[in-house]
Amino acid sequence: MNKVVLTGNDLTLEDLVAVAREHAVVEIADSAVAAIEASRQIVDNIIAEERVVYGVTTGFGSLCEVSISNEDSSQLQENLIRTHSTGYGNPLAEDEVRATMLIRINSLVKGYSGIRLSVVNTLLDMLNKNVIPHIPEKGSLGASGDLAPLAHMVLPMLGLGRAYYNGELMSGKDAMAKAGIEVITLAAKEGLALINGTTVLTGIGALATHDAIELLKLADIAGALSMEAHRGIIDAFYEKLHLIRPHKGCLATAKNIRELLDGSTYITHTAQLRVQDAYSLRCMPQIHGANKDSIAYVKEKVEIEINAGTDNPIITPDGDVISGGNFHGEPMAQPFDLLGIGAAEIGNVSERRIERLVNAQLSDFPSFLVKHPGLNSGFMITQYAAAALVSENKVLAHPASVDSIPSCENQEDFVSMATIAARKARDIIGNSRRVVATEIMAACQAIDFREDEGRKLGVGTQAAYDVVRENLKFIENDKDIEMYDELEKMTELLVDGTIVDAVEKKVSFDIQ
């Protein structure tokens, strides 16, 4: 995808990923230009008529009763940005900042914010020229939107704050100058229009949602490889079983596993070797499927939010100015909590399958998947590390959305904590991805112990196995490897999409 044209109404998750991670060029549709200019004219009329309108001719939050003169309006907007930039912690990643900028622009071009086109174009130029504001990840309550982190986004537009240009962190003023972008002076309403909204939480959560969808595919691949390693029973994946309990995610997972294993001579049938498999194998449709259903719901909410007007007050095309609560993150806080829970469960069940692979009491493989256990520890501590990650996930999966601390002299007395929910989901997904990477690596090691049996893998699992063995060798003994390096190489194959891309040439995944 080389170009994304914004109308404010039809941005997709795939568009967002293309801009955030692949640096697709962004343009504003002509129809959106007209909407922006019409909205700004309404604000100009309000100022000329000296009407009392929140955020335009008044202070902010609990200071909404304080009138601001026309002469002071520009200073008010700059003061807003300077005082609200109170973030803390590590900076958001480049792709998260780019996603944030894109969503903010898409919200502004809807024509409900009263901002000048020139200001929107400044943010657009920053995005296209990859001027990346330094935004600390912590400090947002998720209502009134992401005030603190978005203020950090705006600082370089004013020649303030810090930003990255060509990967180098420098002053916002220098970054703008090096990119050839003029800094701006804010007019009435514009500071508020830029920082009042759910933009950061949605940017982080949208990318996490995309990564969770990829994680679901990888989990099915990992589970299918574990099935072959254990010579698992395919009967539990028959469609006729799942049609009598037709949850979409269950049906999709069962189909994916059947197609991944199509042609495999490793799989078995009921009573051929055993009557039943353990839950972590047999119940993959139910476990993976529940998370597919959850993440499909989250994706639906994300695609509403990335096309939403989340400013306050809202300037309607007929001239009404409505002070409401579209900045409130609660509609996304609960979905992003659910996203984290779903991703945590994927890690949980994957870790249990790792244990079945490395534990000789639960399989017919040597202890810890090495030929000479005792002299060699093999995959012993990979399960420890996976267990640590899933245990951390269980803490992170506690919902952020059930918490609220009043702010702004109790004017903002119930907040969403949605940004925390999004950040936690992102971190859980990263942990679970590492666990799934470990399972794939262990399953391929286990399969190699069966090489002399003359069997063949399924059409999808063979593609995954081939990618693994092109990049990682069978581990003969401990002195040949440093396990961390092997796990890092394995994880990168998941992060960069190499394994999913190879498998998708053979198998078409259903996510719901």
Image (cartoon, grey):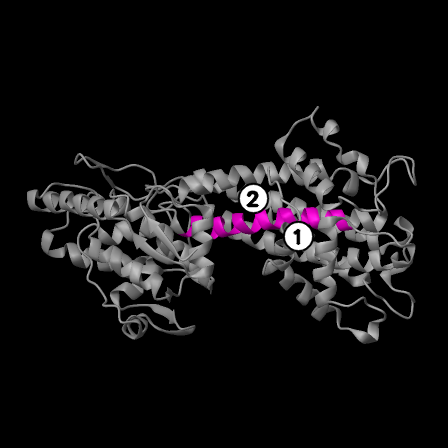
Residue 125 spot, x, y in % from top left: 30, 62
Q: Main secondary structure of the magenta part?
A: helix
User: The residue under label 2 is which amino acid type?
Assistant: Leu
Residue to which mark 1 is pinned: 503
Rate crowding at label 2 as few (under 14), some (14 to 19) or many (20 or more) other CA atoms within 10 Å: many
Q: Is residue 404 magenta?
A: no
Visible in this render: residue 62?
yes
Q: From the image, state whether disc 2 or disc 1 is nearer to you.
A: 1
Residue to which mark 2 is pinned: 339
Residue 276 spot, x, y in % from top left: 86, 36
Q: Secondary structure at mark 1?
A: helix
Which residue is farthest left?
A: 49
Q: Earlier in the sequence, mark 2 or mark 1?
A: 2
- The quadrant of the picture occupied by the N terminus is bottom left
* Quarter residue 510 falls in: top right
Residue 502 spot, x, y in % from top left: 64, 56
Residue drawn at 17 percent across, 57 percent down: 74
Residue span colored magenta:
200-225
In the image, taking residue 418 as reference, residue 132 lies left or right, namely left
* Quarter residue 451 falls in: bottom right
Q: Is residue 220 magenta?
A: yes
Visible in this render: residue 399?
no
Q: Decide: marks 2, 1 in contact (CB < 8 A)?
A: no
